[in-house]
């Protein structure tokens, strides 16, 4: 009897330890944020942009890290980027109050040149609220790239920076392995790419990487997938926001022919779910002219 009692105690203690460790892990993966630093090498990068630093903030979903996002702002300031690119879903479609995001913009926009593109959540908010959001960003000198291009300049060198969004029907598969967002559709939305120049494309969904490359993107910044929400060893990402399993692009840097794509795990969790083994991140990419 005594041995059985001891066995039960050990089982109970084991469960307590497992659930405690799991709780700590869930807290880390949902309430703390890190910065992932990477370098992108290319002989197409103009010499003047060697060591140019781009900070990517994606999928914030009105999340706070510390009071007034103090912890997130600290990470951004530590990175000291040349520009900040926000690749969509900074707010939730069902939000009625954008104060968290507005406070973040107000805190950092005076220190950094910032660019914003529309994610699927911004697409889904009412027109008047979207206008309010865009007006606020523009008031604080954040450049909203609404299927537009601007040129980054350093000395006599330039980089083309595009912002692309598209109809939500292109977020879903047609049941084949073929991309339903074609190069020619991208060209209709944002124009032809000058392939003799270095082109950076900001677009929320990484799903159509091959088509982005064919269009002329040298470097793509995307998010959307939240790192797969739950990540497991060997398996990797489990879910995509379209409720499909094992998304092809979930986090890190991918290559297709001469193009590279940075997929951020993002900062927030959206309106449902939680992260596990998938810490929120911002991404710092340093361009290196080969």
Image (cartoon, rainbow, N blue to C red):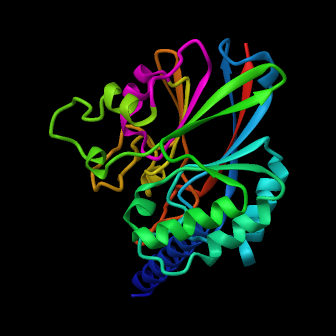
257 and 2: which one is in front?
A: 257
Q: Is residue 199 magenta?
A: yes
Location of residue 128 by image quarter: bottom left
2 and 169: which one is in front?
A: 169
Whether residue 64 is visible here, answered yes or no, is: no
Q: Quadrant of the C terminus?
A: top right
Residue at the spot 48% in from the left edge and 66% down from the top edge: 130
Q: Position of residue 56 (x, y in %)?
A: 64, 46
Residue at the spot 54% in from the left edge and 64% down from the top edge: 268
Q: Position of residue 256 (x, y in %)?
A: 45, 21
Vertical comparison of 260 with 82: above or below:
above
Q: Is residue 261 left or right of residue 53?
A: left
Whether residue 84 is visible here, answered yes or no, is: yes
Location of residue 271 by image quarter: bottom left
Q: Quadrant of the N terminus?
A: bottom left
Boundaries of the magenta span: 191-216
Q: Position of residue 181 (x, y in %)?
A: 30, 35
Q: Position of residue 20 (x, y in %)?
A: 56, 75
5 and 223: which one is in front?
A: 223
Vertical comparison of 183 with 249: above or below:
above
Residue at the spot 40% in from the left edge and 59% down from the top edge: 123
Q: Is residue 159 left or right of residue 126?
A: right
86 and 185: which one is in front?
A: 185
Residue at the spot 77% in from the left edge and 54% down from the top edge: 76
Q: Is residue 194 magenta?
A: yes
Total numbered circles: 0
């Amino acid at each position: 009897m005594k041995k059985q009692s001891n066995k039960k105690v050990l089982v109970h203690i084991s469960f307590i330890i497992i659930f405690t460790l799991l709780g700590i892990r869930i807290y880390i993966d949902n309430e703390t944020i890190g910065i992932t630093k990477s370098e992108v090498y290319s002989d197409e990068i103009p010499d003047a942009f060697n060591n140019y630093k781009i900070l990517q903030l994606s999928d914030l979903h009105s999340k706070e890290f510390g009071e007034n996002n103090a912890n997130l702002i600290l990470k951004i300031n530590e990175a000291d980027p040349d520009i900040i690119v926000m690749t969509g879903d900074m707010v939730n479609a069902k939000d009625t109050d954008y104060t968290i995001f507005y406070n973040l913009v107000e805190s950092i926009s005076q220190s950094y040149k910032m660019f914003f593109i529309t994610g699927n959540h911004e697409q889904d908010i009412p027109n008047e609220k979207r206008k309010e959001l865009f007006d606020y960003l523009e008031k604080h000198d954040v450049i909203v790239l609404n299927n537009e291009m601007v040129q980054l300049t350093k000395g006599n060198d330039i980089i083309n920076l595009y912002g692309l969004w598209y109809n939500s029907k292109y977020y879903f598969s047609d049941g084949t392995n073929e991309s339903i967002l074609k190069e020619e559709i991208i060209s209709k939305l944002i124009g032809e790419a000058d392939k003799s120049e270095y082109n950076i494309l900001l677009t929320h969904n990484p799903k159509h990487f091959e088509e982005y490359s064919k269009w002329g993107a040298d470097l793509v910044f995307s998010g959307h997938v939240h790192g797969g929400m739950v990540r497991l060893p060997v398996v990797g990402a489990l879910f995509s926001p379209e409720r499909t399993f094992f998304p092809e692009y979930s986090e890190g840097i991918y290559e297709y022919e001469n193009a590279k794509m940075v997929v951020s795990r993002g900062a927030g969790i959206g309106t449902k779910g939680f992260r596990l083994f998938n810490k929120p991140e911002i991404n710092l990419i340093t361009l290196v002219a080969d």
